[in-house]
Image (cartoon, rainbow, N blue to C red):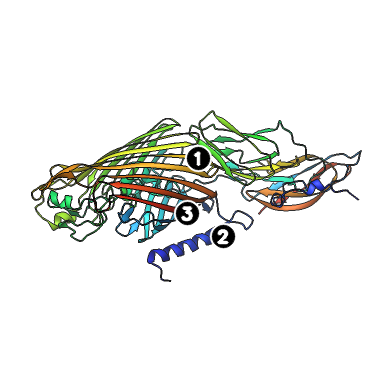
Amino acid sequence: MRLSPAGRVLRVGLAATVICVAWSRPASAQFWPSHPLAYFEGKLLLAGEVSATCGGSDPGWFTYTSYDTSAVRRIRGDVTVEVRPLPQLAVLAELRAETGGGIQPYAAYLRITPFRDRAIDVQVGRIPPVFGSYARRAYPQDNPLIGDPLMYQYLTTLRSDAIPATADDVLRQRARGWLVRYPIGNTQADNGLPVIAVSRYASGVEARAGSSSVEVAVAVTSGTPTEPRPADGSGVQVAGHVAWRPSPVVTLGASASHGTFIESSVRTARPGLPAGHDAQDAVGADGEVSWGRWLVRGEFISSAWELPPVSAPIIGGSLSSRAGYLEAKIRLRPGIYAAARADRLWFSQLSGSSGANTWDADVTRVEAGAGWTFHRGFLLKASVMAHWRDGGRITREQLGALQIVAWF
Amino acid sequence: MRKTSSSCSRVPWAIAALGLVVLAAPCGPLPLLAVDGVIRGHVELPHAQMTMDARPNAAAMGAPAVRPSELRPAVVYLSTAPRGAFEPDESLRATMNQENQTFVPHVLAIAVGTTVDFPNADLVFHNVFSLSRTKSFDLGRYARGSSKAVRFDRPGVVQVFCDIHSHMSAYILVFAHRYFAVTDEAGRYAIPRVPPGVYALAVWHEGSVRQTRQITVPDAGGFVDADFVVR
């Protein structure tokens, strides 16, 4: 059997993990560690997660995260390493390998914690996003369902390395986020981008300060929420998140971000484009309510992308979208839970030569599923998804998916 | 020749394998003038004081809260216990606190029939649960000042976790008798009121039985010393 590069990496990674696990556990103990592996008196920590997902066919491209990768048909492996040479200093790195992509350093940064008794940190390097809330729990073991919220996964028709010349160029691509082609910049067809990308971390600096009830984080990084790592490294983003916990039951958060969305290569390809008109501005609100066996989370994001006006019919103003989801999880029995999420993505109106329409097709997803932790560190999930879209070749679609997750 | 009660061997093999049940040796009647002994000693552990590290999380916006070090003691117990050890006491009660995102104590040894309270002393929610075959339970999320209780009716090892904080873990060892002791900070232990006889004495630490040895409490009773070195 011939394995893809990602498959080979996963096989090697899995073998290495098994060796590490076997080496660190006495034979009489559990066969799978319930905690991260610790070496050198805790100065080196190793954690891992492997997930395999299989799902029904998706001819409508609702679940794809790139042109050739579906969120419900993939194998993914993560290894996280934390080295703490000093109490105030830690180096964190997460290596990820998944179907459709090679091994990549998903995160790699230095964390400085100057005060041991205060929640103040500075993180420098390829860091986690501060915008929104889901991006920091977009791991299979933290996601009660299999699909990601639409705002973090669904491919819109936006690209940061290519732009449309007219409003008609945009409208022609409606519901075709899986393969978009524009005439300015990179003219090769490629997948569009989600409202907020969780598959790539940006490089930059982040500072966090918190207390028991309030946490504030501010970051200056490359890119924007939609494209945190532009191919040419251009663009600067300023983002922040505030979380308030008035009680242990409730957490409320607010986010904002401003950054340069259009890559400089686009201006290089088409000199004379009007200055400005290249930013993404986003604001968001998130919340979590939990009590007893219930956990309810929700998030709402409004984002706008400016594109340079080029030809008539011009793109007047910015393209914007609103997105929101509400998810609930209930623990039914020890190790067993049920969960559901309702999800919607709206797009603003755009006038073309044939009339007005939303610049991309609005999408709705409802997902319901269940999870079973049959052993500490092993989670089996099953879910069904239903999609509706106001455009495109396929406007309705249902599919089911299974996922197994192992982590330590 | 000592008699062996048939009821003494009626235990599930899996539980017996854990060495936490009475195996009825000696199972015969005790001498009328027997004097109970005390088995005592010291257990040397490789790392007596450890704090379970929080799972490295590259997606976190900052470092996890610093937690105090926790004691990870051993449990010393008779894996063969005297006759008359099956006397469940319905009023037994124990407590496992949740403080600074840590279960305190990390190891709790109790007798069958004991009800354990799990109060939350932290500002954040905790969700105590166990998937152990001996006792599986899920207490749901509850806040500071609240407490929930679980009664343990079967002998065995119960590993306890928090669903919200994956670095929180603890053990509850449930015995079918009262002949057990948890080591203190110095590694010392004492099992009092042990009738004369020959027993198997076992040391458990962090999920597994580390050592077992035969020990004799003489008819005259008194102190019987048994030290262990666990590597």
x and y percent of residue A261 in the render? 22, 48
Query: Residue A331: which disc?
Result: 1
Quarter-of-image position of residue A281: top left
**Residue kind at label 1, given as amino acid type:** Arg
Name the subunit of mark 3.
Answer: A
Quarter-of-image position of residue B159: top right
Q: Residue at x 23, y 49 (%)?
A: A391
Quick one: A174 or A116, which is closer to the camera?
A174
Q: Secondary structure at mark 2?
A: helix
Task: Classify B209 as above or below A207.
Answer: below
Q: Which residue is mark 2?
A: A22
x and y percent of residue B6 in the render? 82, 48
Q: Residue at x 56, y 60 (%)?
A: A23
**Residue kind at label 3, given as amino acid type:** Ile
State which mark lies toward you, 3 or 2: 3
Which one is earlier in the sequence, the residue at label 1 or at label 2? 2
Side (left or right) of A392 relative to A133 = left
Quick one: A211 or B93, which is closer to the camera?
B93
x and y percent of residue A299 in the render? 34, 38
Q: Which residue is mark 3?
A: A404
Side (left or right) of A132 relative to B114 = left
Q: Residue at x 17, y 50 (%)?
A: A171
